[in-house]
Image: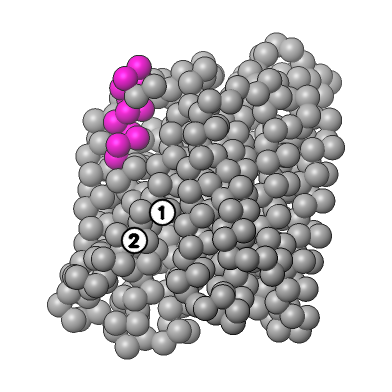
Amino acid sequence: MLRDEPQFARLFVGQSLSVLGDRVSFVAVPFAVLSTGGSASDVGLVAAAGLVPMLLFTLAGGVWADRFQRHRIMLVSDVVRFAVQGLAAALLLTGAAEVPHLVVLMIVFGTADAFFMPAATGLMPLIVGKDRLREANALRGFAQSTGLVLGPALAGGLVALAGPGGALALDSLTFAVSAAVLARLRPRGTASGTPRSPSGAPFLAELSAGWAHVRSRTWVWSGMGAMSVYHIVVLPSVFVLGPVLAEREWGGAASWSVVTAGFGVGSILGDVCAYRIQATRPMALAAAALAVGSCQAVIIGSGAPLALITILEAVTGVAVSLFFVIWETTLQTHIPEAALSRVSSYDYLLSAGLMPLGLALAGPVSESFGVRPTLYAMTVLAVPAALALLCVPAVRRLPAHNPGAAGGSDGVHPASRSTEAALATVCTTHIPEIMLNGNMSGGENACHGTS
């Protein structure tokens, strides 16, 4: 795969290093806050400072990525994040860092992140043939899962030897490497063959056109709904209640790190499976995998021996990785390339963007009803949501490859497709004239990608 796709090979190397740096940063930032004399509340404040811009700018990032060259947007994002992490490292290493400095830097970092992610999803079909997208996404997932295992260990060593500033300096360098790779990347032109529109398409019109792609495909909006449940309901069991239970009953952080490492190893195996499996009905397999992955809460709260919990968490790691690789590949296969970043921006907003809601509620709910009952309730909510996704006909029937002219096969009703085709003709003929004085320059046609 890496030999056959040199453009992807370059991106893979750069992004693998960047992911490893991100995992190091994930561990180092809380210690950076504490090293300045900050409190636990300050740690949460800095974390939120990086997250809020994601909520505000992800949709804008999707529109921009469908307008402009995606690898250039990623390059700018990497340069900004290189500067942010480098400045944070310098402040920490010189002892000049304070909590407000870190808050401001994380706001800038989160804003750059919001533009990077939709562009990265939309870039893949421009550097990899459609028949290799699944393999490419599996390799990308493999790098992320490996970073999940290696990053915290590397971060622990760096923080111990060079302090949080040294760890963030390493993360800064990985962004520099990623930017250098992106500068040499030469993606193909638009994969869909749909021409870019003249400048002047309004921002909100383009955003609305992206949403039209979501709501016109049952498998897309139902998949996003099931994923939202996973992020809001299941992941708080891992990020909030799991550590609480480990501290109370398992002996603390060391035991919890064993469980999380088990999940990480399972994630790696899941990426390997995704690389090899060629499902004829990929979304049906993804929905079944999501149902397995949604069992994490009940496993954590089961009261089983630690070794068994670790093994079962590894199984859920396989399922979760399999789901996300299939989901990204299916989006890249069935969504027109010219609208892909906008669709993925809704995906990020409705999944990762809503996760803080679950994180905020998990603690108070568990304090009212108990940790274990809350974990069981999470499973009662999440597993049926995944099984409901499996019951959706458009999900079960969606083929691995987009047959193009076969109306309705991708979840769009044939009548809707005819309406969209007529709308595309009207847009192509008249909208550029009407929108000539629009408020956003360099944009896509507001009706671009209506197929």
Q: Which residue is mark 1?
A: 149
Give the image location of residue 97, x and y in percent.
25, 79
Q: Can residue 337 be seen in this snapshot?
A: no
For the N terminus, give its image quadrant. Answer: top left
Give the image location of residue 327, x and y in percent.
61, 36
Above or below, 114 relative to 98: above
Residues packed near mark 2 inside 10 Å, few (<14), some (14 to 19) or many (20 plus): some
Q: Residue at x 47, y 65 (%)?
A: 257
Report if the CB atoms under discs 2 and 1 are less than 8 Å apart: yes
Indicate left or right for 186 with 129 as reference.
left
Magenta span: 3-14
Q: Residue at x 38, y 74 (%)?
A: 30
As helix, strand or loop, the secondary structure at mark 1 comes to helix
Give the image location of residue 235, x and y in percent.
62, 61
Separation of marks 2 and 1 at Cα, in angstroms: 7 Å
Amino acid carrying label 1: it is Val
Residue 108 falls inside the magenta stretch: no
Give the image location of residue 415, x and y in percent.
84, 21
Above or below, 437 relative to 246: above
The residue sitting at the top extreme is 405
What secondary structure predominates along the stretch shown in magenta? helix
